[in-house]
Image (cartoon, grey):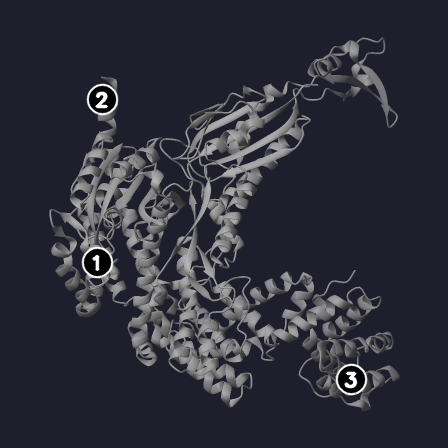
């Protein structure tokens, strides 16, 4: 099964479970969780079921397109369901079957993995799902987002598309994976992989990046003061990406990380709190609609 | 009486492996405690667990609580009954409150006063009526980490999926987290189905048919047998790491061991890298030859049977191949680099924005370790090695391998240092300077390692204190407490005869040299000494030293740690001596009165007025020479204890605060000089004597 078919299969599967199919969010981010469709919408009492593909940038994982397992940018298929359904593990396993993975021919395990994203003040409990020893999915019950307790709890399922595809297509090298009809990852992504790796490790302007971090942070705060949650959050995401670039360049020590992460966490907490307040002012409209639908 | 078995099974989404066994034991303890408290007789308590269930069976449980007779005491007779024998309201109320009538009241004398009593017969309740409390027991389990899910308010280790609760063949009805108890269990996730449990005695077998081995001991046995079988077939040695076995056992419901291979060329990687990749990342058992060398095979335990097991093996091989290919790439890249170039890269890494770069930190480590080497009279050879080790101690942080496997910091440093031709003790120190890495870890074994380790930790603590990062309560993000404890332990184990204050001063000097923070030297030094004293106190407490003795030996902060520790154990060993109390009192008198002394004018024997003064003075003169010659704290204690009788006689016959000012000054001067020796041993007045 090529990647395009995998995505179509997953979209169909989760669409059938009542998920809204969204498109990727257009600001650089390290993980699908950071999309406002997850980070913001996991906050508060309103129900929310979505699925989307998120291209995720991990500058430190860039390998100039030479390493068979590592990518500067990989793809995640992200599912959020709030509140988490009782049969969510079964729904997930059904999606693997839809992808042609017969559990009786493999070793599928749920191994503890408590996920944390300190820079966004997020914490969750759950598992990494192992397919014959390979981590193919992060499966998380959000407990806290932006420093706020989640109530109800959202479940987040994040499939690593390339990982899963390398298994399904039985390929050793990520660049040989077929995206569709004879187009491979190499055809589509090799050049950007090389260039972004070179940029990340060699040609990025460290001083400028440190400077940008400060500028973005300031703008995020300024927009927060205006009560504009979404623009502020975009700048938090930009801070995070710049931080990742600096980190990959080796410009930030272990100790200093703590301080930078603290700054981003403070911003994320403010954004989360304001988002909650703004939705409350609106009377949590999705909750209302859902309530009305239930009455009819 | 009729006896039946109780079965409780809590079905869950996969629990973290590390919580399974302890949660199972906890459930068993709580259920037995409940039955005992409720006076319900029962037989054996059997425990079961898998990643998806915690279960307990209580054999031969009687169907009702034992009946009891309870004597209840009421009001005094004169309040209970009027003189003509009529019952008062108080008596009626008491009887009613006990569920009896006044006719049941009898009187008994207690300490010469008669009181009303009733003998209450309490019929035991039916066990079946009490068992729904199992719900509260199940909900009362505590786990290392709890979670919420869906709309539920309950916090539990993982979401609750089903509950089997049986007494005999009957369901014990209750509901928790929206799940109703019943007699249906769920088998293996893929190989099994739901199944009805008839009664506790068929529990294990019913689930076995559903590919779940509920007894963890039997499951572990299956794994071990599987490993042995592979050893036999292939002539391998598979060392069994108990922690790994326990974890793997709690990751599977139906274990089947299988093996896979990786390319032999990866055997060129350091063993630590291979083992970390297999064990920590994949939960595989590494495979060895009889002579202990690693083979290019691994063993993993599948959660399932042997259907399509080759496919599972191929999948696992693919994962490990990718991991090792990565490691191999890093290893080869790292070997191209030169240590001094890597050290140079540390200039670009900010250690902390208020403290500076890693490179600056390394420069301080060099200066501090050099100062410590001088303080501890290190040989020239050690000094040379220490300087080099300090210079390169952080280079592996910028290697690709350590970036990828942070747990190998130091370990890779030692390996690479060896390969690049560094001296043996330098390479070892690069690794050892991180020691002790955790609470129970050992200290560096070599002097070079100890010097660099102390310099590094001292620098971290001092620089953090300088910029105001000071541990408070549970807040200690940079683990400064652990590092201070590491310093103290290292100094004690290496028997450094250097006052802690001097060591701290060396750190303060170099941190302030780099203009870190805004504190002055004496403030910073005081803060850090106080911080260390708390650590020393803690270590001495752990060694079982009495708190007042700890305070007494720590009072003199300029002492060496070794001296403090020795003085403390000498005092501990003498505290039960017959004369201990009198000895301490005599020495304390000297110390207390010596506080009244002004500047030392010297002792002039011509002012002595009695024999006792002369004797004590001569004993003092002997002490001066004997003190420096005394090689142990124990010998010093004997010297001081030997003064007891003379001191007592002195005070019996001498008025220190004499009217004649010169005589008084002279006597105080002697007291003061004696007190200096006593205080050098310990702040004796702080010691409690009964």
Residue B648: x and y, percent?
A: 84, 74
CA–CA distance in space, label 2 to label 3: 98 Å
Residue A5: x and y, percent?
A: 17, 41
Res A174 visible: yes
Residue pointed to by mark 2: A293
Q: Which of marks 2 and 3 is in front?
A: 2
Label 2 residue SS = helix
Q: In this view, does B82 lie to the left or right of B259?
A: right
Numbered marks: total: 3
Query: Are labels 3 and 1 assigned to the same chain?
Result: no
Name the residue nearer the viewer: B322 or B574.
B322
Q: Residue B620 carries which label?
A: 3
CA–CA distance in space, label 3 to label 1: 78 Å
Name the residue nearer the viewer: B90 or B157.
B157
Residue pointed to by mark 1: A72
Q: Mark 2 lies on which chain?
A: A
Callout 2: 10 Å neighbours few (<14), some, many (20+)? few
Residue at horizontal 87%, vertical 84%? Answer: B610
Res B468 visible: no
Residue A84: x and y, percent?
A: 33, 34
Callout 3: 10 Å neighbours few (<14), some, many (20+)? some
Label 1 residue SS = loop
């Amino acid at each position: 099964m090529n990647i395009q078919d995998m995505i179509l299969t997953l979209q169909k599967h989760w669409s059938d479970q009542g998920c809204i199919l969204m498109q990727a969010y257009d600001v650089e981010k390290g993980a699908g969780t950071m999309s406002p469709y997850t980070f913001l919408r996991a906050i508060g009492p309103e129900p929310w079921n979505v699925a989307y593909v998120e291209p995720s940038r991990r500058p430190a994982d860039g390998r100039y397109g030479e390493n068979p397992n590592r990518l500067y940018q990989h793809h995640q298929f992200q599912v959020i369901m709030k509140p988490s359904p009782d049969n969510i593990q079964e729904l997930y396993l059904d999606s693997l079957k839809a992808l042609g993975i017969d559990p009786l021919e493999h070793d599928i395990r749920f191994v503890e993995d408590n996920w944390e994203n300190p820079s966004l003040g997020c914490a969750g409990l759950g598992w990494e799902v192992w397919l014959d020893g390979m981590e193919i999915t992060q499966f998380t019950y959000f407990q806290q987002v932006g420093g706020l307790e989640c109530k109800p709890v959202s479940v987040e399922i994040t499939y690593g598309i390339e990982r899963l595809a390398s298994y399904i297509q039985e390929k050793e090298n990520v660049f040989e994976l077929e995206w569709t009809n004879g187009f491979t990852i190499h055809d589509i992504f090799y050049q950007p992989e090389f260039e972004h790796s070179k940029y990340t490790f060699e040609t990025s302007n460290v001083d400028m990046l440190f400077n940008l971090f400060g500028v973005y942070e300031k703008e995020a705060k300024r927009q927060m003061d205006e009560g504009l949650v979404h623009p502020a959050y975009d700048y938090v995401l930009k801070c995070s990406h710049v931080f990742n670039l600096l980190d990959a360049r080796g410009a930030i020590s272990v100790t200093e990380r703590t301080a930078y992460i603290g700054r981003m966490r403070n911003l994320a907490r403010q954004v989360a709190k304001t988002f909650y307040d703004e939705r409350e002012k609106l009377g949590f409209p999705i909750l209302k609609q859902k309530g009305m639908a239930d009455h009819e | 009486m009729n006896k039946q078995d109780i079965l409780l099974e809590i079905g869950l989404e996969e629990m973290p492996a590390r919580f399974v066994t302890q949660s199972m034991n906890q459930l068993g303890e709580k259920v037995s405690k409940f039955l005992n408290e409720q006076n319900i007789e029962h037989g054996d308590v059997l425990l079961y667990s898998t990643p998806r269930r915690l279960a307990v069976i209580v054999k031969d449980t009687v169907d009702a609580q034992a009946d009891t007779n309870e004597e209840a005491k009421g009001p005094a007779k004169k309040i209970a009954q009027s003189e003509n024998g009529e019952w008062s309201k108080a008596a009626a109320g008491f009887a009613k409150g006990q569920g009896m009538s006044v006719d049941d009241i009898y009187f008994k004398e207690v300490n010469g006063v008669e009181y009303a009593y009733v003998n209450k017969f309490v019929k035991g309740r039916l066990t079946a009526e009490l068992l729904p409390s199992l719900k509260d027991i199940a909900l009362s389990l505590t786990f290392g980490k709890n979670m919420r899910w869906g709309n539920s308010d309950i916090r539990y280790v993982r979401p609750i999926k089903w509950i089997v609760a049986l007494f005999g063949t009957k369901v014990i009805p209750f509901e928790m987290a929206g799940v109703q108890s019943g007699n249906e269990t769920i088998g293996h996730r893929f190989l099994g189905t739901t199944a009805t449990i008839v009664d506790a005695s068929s529990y294990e077998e019913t689930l076995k048919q559903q590919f779940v081995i509920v007894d963890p001991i039997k499951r572990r046995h299956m794994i071990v047998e599987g490993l042995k079988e592979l050893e036999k077939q292939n002539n391998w040695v598979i060392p069994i790491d108990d922690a790994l076995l326990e974890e793997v056992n709690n990751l599977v419901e139906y274990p089947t061991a299988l093996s896979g291979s990786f390319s032999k060329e990866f055997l060129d990687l350091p063993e630590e890298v291979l083992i970390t990749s297999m064990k920590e990342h994949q939960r595989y058992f590494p495979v060895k030859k009889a002579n202990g060398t690693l083979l290019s095979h691994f063993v993993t335990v599948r959660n399932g049977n042997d259907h399509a097991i080759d496919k599972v093996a191929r999948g696992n091989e693919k994962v490990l191949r990718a991991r090792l290919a990565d490691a191999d790439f890093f290893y080869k890249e790292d070997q191209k680099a030169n240590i001094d170039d890597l050290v140079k890269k540390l200039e670009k890494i900010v250690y902390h924005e208020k403290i500076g770069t890693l490179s600056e930190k390394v420069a301080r480590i060099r200066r501090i370790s050099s100062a410590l080497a001088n303080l501890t009279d290190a040989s020239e050879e050690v000094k040379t090695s220490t300087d080099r080790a300090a210079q390169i101690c952080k280079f592996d942080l910028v290697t690709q391998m350590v970036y990828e496997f942070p747990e190998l910091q130091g370990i890779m440093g030692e390996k690479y240092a060896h390969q690049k031709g560094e001296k043996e003790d330098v390479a070892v120190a690069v690794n050892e300077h991180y020691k002790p890495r955790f609470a129970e870890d050992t200290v560096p074994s070599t002097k070079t390692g100890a010097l660099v380790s102390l310099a590094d930790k001292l620098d971290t603590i001092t620089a953090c204190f300088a910029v105001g990062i000071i541990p408070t309560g549970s807040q200690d993000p940079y683990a400064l407490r652990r590092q201070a404890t590491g310093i103290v332990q290292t100094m004690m184990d290496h028997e450094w005869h250097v006052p802690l204050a001097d060591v701290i001063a060396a750190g303060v000097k170099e941190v302030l040299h780099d203009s870190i923070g805004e504190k002055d030297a004496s403030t910073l030094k005081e803060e850090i000494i106080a911080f260390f004293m708390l650590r020393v106190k803690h270590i001495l407490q752990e060694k079982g030293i009495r708190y007042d003795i700890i305070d007494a030996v720590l009072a003199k902060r300029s002492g060496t740690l070794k001296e403090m520790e020795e003085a403390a154990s000498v005092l501990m060993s003498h505290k039960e001596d017959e004369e201990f109390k009198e000895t301490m009192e005599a020495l304390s008198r000297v110390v207390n009165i010596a506080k009244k002394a002004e500047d030392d004018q010297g002792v002039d024997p011509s002012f002595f007025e009695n024999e006792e003064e002369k004797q004590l003075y001569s004993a003092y003169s002997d002490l001066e020479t004997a003190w420096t010659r005394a090689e142990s704290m124990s010998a010093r204690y004997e010297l001081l204890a030997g003064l007891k009788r003379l001191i007592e006689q002195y005070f019996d016959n001498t008025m220190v605060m004499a009217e004649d000012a010169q005589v008084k000054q002279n006597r105080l001067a002697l007291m003061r000089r004696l007190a200096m020796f006593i205080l050098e041993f310990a702040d004796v007045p702080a010691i409690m004597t009964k």
